[in-house]
């Protein structure tokens, strides 16, 4: 119980940076400090409930994974636009509408599988990590804008470095149990150093002292209003946030399943529905939208702790914090260098997780461009600030973050480059010639075009080559052998047809005595080996020709 509580607390530390968004809304739109404080308290309850919903595994709602929810940065531009248009009631109303969009999108996810092959989900996951770099590094280095010069603060770097290397040290060299608390230890030591160095100001301490120990949270209660002109910006925001959730939940699936092959769209659909419910709840209390927290997914990878119980603990603690203002303020005043160290720690794992998804499938020129162009366009947002400011206002929410630009680019280029890819390919093989290279090149080309798993293509190559070698050695075929290979996301099938003698595929391996006394036993051994390469095999005659069907699960 204590371990679960401590791990849940670590996740809340990673979530605490989200409490800055109401403050940003205050700075950008002039809402009152009291309103921002109420939004923070309300967000704790909403984040807690949404995290618990996300963790559920039963019914249509919830992904069943530890994937905490937080105030979504993707919603910030549209939220600012809504407040400037109609104040907090407009923010509440449009956020509520966003949740309804999310609910509808969640019901369609099962049909959208072709839009999320490994190169798209891998790109999204990688960009989730890359998108956190500016936030992480700026806090780590204590960068403040001084005119046009960004000044690095040596004190911030020192404190962030201490916290970061403690996290890394405990994770790399600590015992298996101690690794679970590496982040918590690093945050505590970093916070103590920040206090001792004066980085935690007297105003922060005064704010903590004046906060009540226990009180009921209050909500804005200013009603709801709507604007047709804001529907499109919020719709784009929901799409970008949902695609980010696809990436986060894909990582959750991968780290919980050692034999992960592809995204489970049913689980993702339930996760997006849970997120949409959190968004609607946010709108009902006058707050901005929710999204899955990539930093927390990275934290799960780093600690190796992925139990759903941690998600329930995290959600419960967040709800309790809304009734304990002192604890809420304690998280709100966490020093920026410590937050930077925490984010940098998790970014490392996020980027590697994305690369692992990308390399789980074969890549050809088409998929190389899908990934490469999307990453370049995404990074252009951070590397060339303001480059997309001339984009029409309705489309601007889609161009406000590197993640949204890369995500939309990956989806569009994936659709474009699917043109011309046939799901079936044919090959004519002369059994009298050495055809190994012909088979290997053919399957490599098709595997790359289809984005198939390399391990499956390698098994198919081995099975086909073994069959052709045996057919040549035993003169089973009287002419050329025709092979047709078909592929979908779940199956790879090879249909081989030829004129000649059928080949046996025994379930049992021929004995050594059989191999010494029966010439046909060699063919049986080859058939036995081929059966081991594939998941299913069938041999028969059709229209007077021999047919061998090889099936491999993908």
Image (cartoon, rainbow, N blue to C red):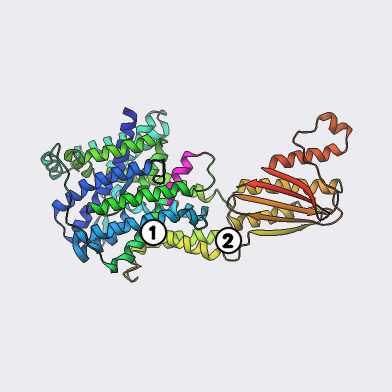
Residues packed near mark 1 inside 10 Å, few (<14), some (14 to 19) or many (20 plus): many
From what the image shows, is residue 294 above or below residue 402?
above
Provide the residue span drawn in magenta: 246-258
Q: Position of residue 46 (x, y in %)?
A: 27, 46
In the displayed structure, would residue 197 be above or below residue 151?
A: above
Please tell me whether the stretch drawn in magenta is mainly helix, strand or loop: helix
Q: Are marks 2 and 1 in contact (CB under 8 Å)?
A: no
Horizontal arrangement in the rendering, residue 496 relative to residue 115 (left or right)? right
SS label for mark 1: helix
Q: Which is more toward the observer, 478 or 507?
A: 507
Seen from this angle, which residue lies furthest front? 59
Q: Secondary structure at mark 2?
A: helix
Q: Does any portion of residue 325 appear in the rendered image?
A: yes
Image quarter for residue 5?
A: top left
- Can you give x and y, in whole percent of width and height, for residue 138 in the image? 30, 52
Residue placed at 29% from the left, 36% from the top?
Answer: 9
Q: Is residue 384 left or right of residue 113?
A: left
**Residue 478 found in image quarter:** bottom right
Q: Nearer the viewer, mark 2 or mark 1?
A: 1
- Residue 177 percent coordinates (x, y): 39, 28
Q: Which residue is mark 2?
A: 365
Task: Please say whether residue 430 is one of the residues in the magenta stretch.
Answer: no
Q: For residue 110, which numbered disc appears in the image?
A: none
Taking the image as shown, residue 365 lies to the left or right of residue 340, namely right
Residue picked out by circle 1? 239
Disc 2 to disc 1, C-alpha distance: 27 Å
Q: Is residue 162 visible?
A: no
């Amino acid at each position: 119980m204590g371990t679960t509580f401590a791990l849940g607390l670590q996740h809340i530390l990673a979530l605490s940076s989200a409490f800055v968004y109401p403050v940003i809304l205050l700075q950008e739109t002039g809402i009152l400090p009291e309103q921002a404080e109420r939004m923070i308290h309300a967000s704790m309850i909403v984040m807690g409930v949404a995290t618990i919903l996300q963790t559920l595994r039963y019914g249509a709602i919830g992904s069943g994974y530890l994937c905490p929810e937080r105030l979504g940065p993707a919603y910030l531009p549209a939220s600012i636009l809504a407040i400037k248009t109609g104040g907090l009631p407009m923010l509440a109303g449009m956020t509520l509408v966003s949740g309804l969009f999310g609910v509808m999108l969640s019901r369609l996810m099962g049909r959208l599988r072709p839009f999320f092959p490994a190169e798209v989900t891998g790109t999204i996951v990688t960009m989730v990590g890359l998108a956190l770099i500016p936030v992480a590094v700026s806090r780590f280095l204590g960068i403040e804008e001084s005119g046009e010069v960004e000044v690095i603060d040596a004190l911030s770097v020192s404190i962030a470095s201490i916290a970061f290397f403690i996290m890394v040290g405990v994770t790399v060299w600590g015992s298996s149990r101690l690794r679970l608390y590496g982040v918590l230890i690093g945050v505590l030591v970093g916070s103590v150093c920040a206090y001792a160095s004066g980085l935690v100001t007297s105003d922060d301490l005064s704010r903590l002292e004046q906060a009540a120990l226990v009180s009921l949270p209050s909500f804005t209660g200013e009603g709801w209003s709507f604007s047709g002109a804001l529907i499109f910006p919020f719709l784009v925001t929901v799409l970008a946030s949902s695609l980010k959730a696809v990436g986060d939940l894909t990582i959750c699936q991968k780290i919980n399943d050692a034999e992960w092959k592809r995204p489970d769209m049913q689980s993702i659909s339930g996760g997006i529905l849970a997120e949409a419910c959190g968004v609607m709840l946010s709108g009902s209390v006058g707050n901005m939208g929710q999204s899955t927290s990539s930093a927390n997914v990275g934290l799960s990878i780093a600690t190796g702790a992925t139990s759903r119980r941690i998600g329930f603990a995290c959600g419960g603690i967040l709800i309790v914090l809304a009734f304990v203002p002192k604890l809420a303020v304690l998280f709100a005043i966490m020093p920026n260098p410590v937050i930077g160290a925490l984010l940098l720690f998790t970014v490392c794992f996020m980027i590697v997780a994305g690369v692992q998804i990308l390399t789980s499938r074969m890549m050809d020129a088409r998929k190389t461009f899908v990934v490469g162009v999307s990453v370049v366009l995404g990074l252009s947002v951070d590397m060339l600030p303001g480059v997309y400011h001339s984009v029409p206002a309705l489309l601007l929410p889609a161009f406000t973050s590197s993640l949204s630009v890369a995500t939309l680019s990956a989806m569009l280029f994936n659709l474009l480059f699917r043109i011309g890819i046939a799901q079936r390919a044919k090959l004519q093989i002369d059994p009298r010639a050495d055809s190994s290279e012909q088979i290997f090149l053919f399957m490599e080309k098709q595997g790359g075009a289809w984005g198939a798993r390399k391990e499956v293509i390698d098994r198919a190559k081995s099975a086909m080559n073994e069959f052709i070698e045996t057919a040549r050695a035993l003169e089973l075929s009287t002419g050329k052998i025709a092979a047709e290979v078909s592929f979908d996301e779940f199956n790879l099938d090879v249909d081989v047809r030829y004129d000649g003698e059928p080949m046996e595929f025994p379930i049992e391996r021929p004995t050594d005595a059989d191999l010494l006394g029966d010439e046909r036993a060699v063919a049986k051994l080859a058939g036995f080996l081929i059966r081991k390469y594939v998941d299913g095999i069938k041999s028969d005659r059709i229209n007077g020709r021999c047919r061998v069907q090889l099936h491999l699960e993908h």
